[in-house]
Amino acid sequence: MQGRYPHQSYGFKHRGVSTEKPHISYTHSIDVFQQSGHPGMLVQLFRSTHLKTLLHLRVTAFTAVLGLLLIIFGYFNAYQHSLQSSVDEIQQSMLAVADTASIAVYTENKELADEALHVLIHNPLICSARMNDNAHSFFRFTGNGNFCHQSKELLVSSPFNQHESIGILHVTINAAVVRDRALKLARLISSMILLVLLGSALTLSIATQRILTQPLTQMAESIHNLLPGSSSRLSVPEIHRHNEFGALVVDINSLLATVESTLTEERHLRMIIHSLQQQYQSIFDHARTGIALIDENGRCILANPAVSHMLGLDFSADGPFCLDQHWLEVVFGDNQYFQELMESALNSGQMITRDIPLYRKTVHTDAPRPAWLNVSVSSHFAEEDPQAQTQENCRLLECVLLDISERKRKEDESKYRAEHDALTQLKNRAAGMAAIDTLLLAANSSPKGAILLIDLDRFKFINDTYGHAAGDTILITTARRMQEISRSIDVVARLGGDEFLVGLFHVESVNHFPKILHRIIEVLTQPVLIAPDVREQVGASIGVALVPQCGTDLTYLMHCADEAMYRVKRAGRCGYCIYNGSDYEEPVKVVNNG
């Protein structure tokens, strides 16, 4: 530090006064805490579930820690500040007598020097003072010399030239007085901080209790006593009506109102869901449509009574769970159609519908079963969540079964009526030609065959003589006889009137046709009972076109067969004529000897 004159410098030379911070030991406190035998007690207290206790403990702990830090800081800060103040006070005392000392040293006035030193040693912080120039020295002593180890010097300048040094002013410091003063000030400041902290902590605790803890405790008890969905609400304390606590109570009341509304709506929805469940269960149980749930291994998991009725299975004892994967074979016989239906639904992920015939033999019940079912199958995962749809998550098949036996019967009847002649029950012209066309498509790689056109001889005479009933009897008997001698692979159709179309295929050799044609004529020319005790005989003129010698076009084949048939009629009727693709053979007349 620089003095009032340019060449004056001041400073302590620390020779005996210790400036180290006093040592404070915590050993006793630690020993007491360890001797308690419960090192976790403090942690348990701070984890108390009671807000009041927890808040007070935390405020106390915070105040204690903050107070300890403030006291330590205040103590050492006051101690250092007191030391620095003592140094500054000594500095000011030396500066106060600097001018007097300058004159005394310059004039070598002992009385004036002694007066200046006397002023310095009256300061209790100074033990001794000395002033000297090149030839003289002036001394003054006071205090206990045992603690006077630190000194301070001040250069004395000439009164007329501030840059000329003419002497030295030297003082020794009373370290004991300096330290005692610093300790007293530090203790005073620490005591004041402690009192302020204690007062603040007490005030904070009371304020917290009245403003926060008590209202929160009351609110917690009120919330605890509330019933879910009740109309009761929390009351807002008057002192908190316009602050955050009041806003919290308002928000809680709003939440309680929302909960009440939600619970009321939920009760209403539960009633609706229960009603819908009963309705759906009633629909499920009484539906005439079969509804079943099947896993991908073919095991039936769920089924309504309609399924039991349709499939002829008894679920009354064990339910559908008694069915293993073999039940499909029992129900459907050849379950290939149903297996393909399941695989298509699993692979495509779409609804697949197919008509499937049932195995007619009943399984566990004597009740009649449908012959045909319309089965609609769609697949989905057992879990709707896409993240849960793993390989381990089984895929289920929803099956809807509809009895279409009556529809199938009507369809078959309609189809039969559309394809068959109403009188003779043979295929009609369109159905017969379509069936023969189908066989002709395979004729390129099939054995030989032929197309036959048959015209009944004497039919017009009998029909005109005995009436239409007799003619119908002739036609019906002829159709029955042709069906009796034909094979299942042959096609027999009535073209109209007394003309018939026959398709013969899979004939091993052309040489077999004469024998076949003779047999047909012999059967058709047998007498027919057209009235009581009245028998009539008809003949048969047959035109034949060989396949594939004449080609595979049915229109052309019928044309060739028709031409061959008229050749027979021109030759005398009741016979056959074969067109071999290049020429018409000579008509052969067949005489029935029966």
Image (cartoon, rainbow, N blue to C red):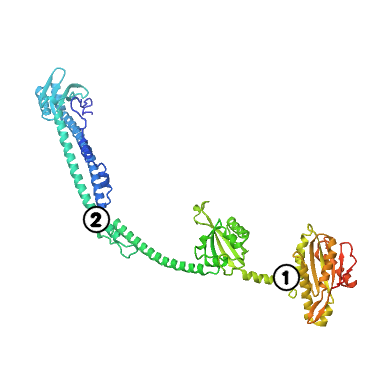
User: Between residues 427 and 14, which one lies in front from this camera angle?
Assistant: 427
- Judged from the image, the secondary structure of the residue bearing numbered disc 1 is helix
Q: Give residue 409's position: percent from left, percent from top.
A: 65, 70
The answer to whether 68 appears left or right of 136 in the picture is right
Q: Is residue 161 above or below residue 267?
A: above
Residue 243, visible in the rendered structure:
no
Residue farthest to the front, as pictured: 594
Residue 581, visible in the rendered structure:
yes
Q: Quadrant of residue 488?
A: bottom right
Q: Quadrant of residue 32?
A: top left
Q: Which residue is mark 2?
A: 214
Q: Amino acid at mark 2?
A: Gln
Q: Give residue 148's position: percent from left, percent from top.
A: 14, 25
Residue farthest to the top, as pictured: 135
User: Between residues 222 and 423, which one lies in front from this camera angle?
Assistant: 423
The answer to whether 348 appears left or right of 514 in the picture is left
- Judged from the image, the secondary structure of the residue bearing numbered disc 2 is helix
Q: Quadrant of residue 22?
A: top left
Density class for disc 2 (Cα within 10 Å; few <14, some 14-19, many ≥20) is: some
Comparing labels 2 and 1, the label whose residue is closer to the camera: 1
Do the numbered discs 2 and 1 sit on residues whose CB atoms are within 8 Å?
A: no
Q: Give residue 18's position: percent from left, percent from top.
A: 19, 28
State how far apart marks 2 and 1 are (Cα): 98 Å
Q: Amino acid at mark 1?
A: Glu
Q: Is residue 264 above or below residue 159?
A: below
The answer to whether 317 appears left or right of 446 in the picture is left
Q: Which residue is mark 1?
A: 419
Looking at the image, tell me whether mark 2 or mark 1 is earlier in sequence order.
2
